[in-house]
Amino acid sequence: MPPKKILVIDPDAASRTFVARTLQQVGYEMLQAGSAKEGLISAYRDRPDVIILEPAAQDIPGEDFAGRIRQDTRTAQVALIALSSDASVARMKSCLDAGFNEYITKSGQAIPALMDAINRLARLTEATSREGGLLIVFLSAKGGTGTSSLCANLAMNIAQNQPEVKVVVADLVLPIGSIAQIVGYEGPNNLVTLANQNPTDTTGGLIAAKLVDMPDWRFHLLAGSPDPESSNLLKVGRIWNLVNSMKASYDYVILDLGRSLSKISLPLIQNADLIVMIVSTDLSTISTSRTLWDYLVSKDIQDSSVYTILNRAVGLEGLTKVDAEKIIGLQIKTTMPYLGGNFALANNYHQPLSLKFPNDTAALILKETAKDMAALATRLRAE
């Protein structure tokens, strides 16, 4: 395995050189930059596996630097470490919220902490998107389209169609998740609590012990944030670590992103094996979905990796499949029929629709759609 390539960005030449030489002595290929602007150029050109940045750089604040790194497909998955002279909790939180994976204060213990962080984070490279379990993300351009319900029910059908596979569903909708309520989980473990744990306790196969088995649903669950206050405590820089740990332990990792489109969710979308876009039949949602699709195209998302589902969540009225396809500019792969109160009733009983109403037409559509999605994700990974 070739040495990991690490970029150190620090206007303090003495500090930068010390870190670079220390890491070079243990076998890493080192790059250096004296400003954040130079660092961005190097990051885009040289594609390091890890970037170590002094966030107090004068030309570009560390938080802005992280935003640019996370929004560019060339660097979205790079491990980003703040090695900072600022020990304040406020700066630490703002950097982690901006997309840094780790925040280390410059001190006598900084190098050991840095070594430990690199060992854990250096796996977060582009190659990891082609390794481990298949990554399927659910999203929508607008709320009220039934994205979370379809996410849970289709995940259940994927697991039911393939009894030999392991499936995990992670609710990444912020500030409040909803899949826990749908499947009937009321425990304390969720995205926020897991992200706040020691990273060494959630790596590789260890993460499975932290997730909740939902027998009726046939998958393990990482529940979402229970309330807005909890979401403010989320260490967003840890999300990629958690996703990669789940990919190492499960055959399918299914993420509910809801209508969240941010510097955190965009890299997940860009590196997914399959993107499931849920749209409804009202003109407002369809038009907003076109805006979302145009944005994804600008981020190099290919239409071949998008599986669009037209969900008649609110009634029989609205645009037809043909009209919706013309407006969005995407082929709609599946149309879910209007279910009346059946979906709501199944959700109220915390049961999959396929178990509560096994003879319903929608149950058959869910089964076939799950087969189609799994086959497409597998084929796209192999290409």
Image: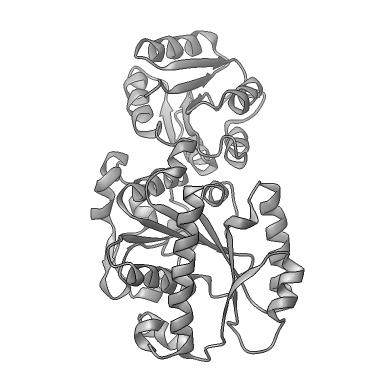
**Camera-side residue: 381 or 73?**
381
Q: Does the rendering let one see residue 382?
A: yes
Q: Nearer the viewer, residue 29 or 222?
A: 29
Q: Residue at x 58, y 82 (%)?
A: 313
Relative to residue 17, is residue 189 drawn left or right?
Answer: left
Q: Position of residue 302 (x, y in %)?
A: 64, 52
Figure quadrant of residue 155? bottom left
Q: Position of residue 238 (x, y in %)?
A: 42, 44
Figure quadrant of residue 336? bottom right
Relative to 129, residue 57 above or below: above
Query: Percent x, y for residue 46?
Result: 57, 23
Q: Nearer the viewer, residue 151 or 102?
A: 151
In the image, what residue occupies the spot 48% across and 68% down? 372
- Quarter holding the N terminus? top left
One can see residue 180 in this view: no
Query: Considering only vertical position in the picture, is 366 above or below 341?
Result: above
Question: Which residue is drawn at the image coordinates 38% and 11% (left, top)?
Answer: 22
Instruction: Report how many numbered discs are placed on residues in the image.
Output: 0
Q: Residue drawn at (38%, 57%), measured in percent from left and top? A: 252
Colour scheme of the picture: one colour
Q: Percent x, y for residue 281?
A: 67, 79
- When the figure is inspected, residue 207 is found, relative to residue 180, above or below; the finding is above
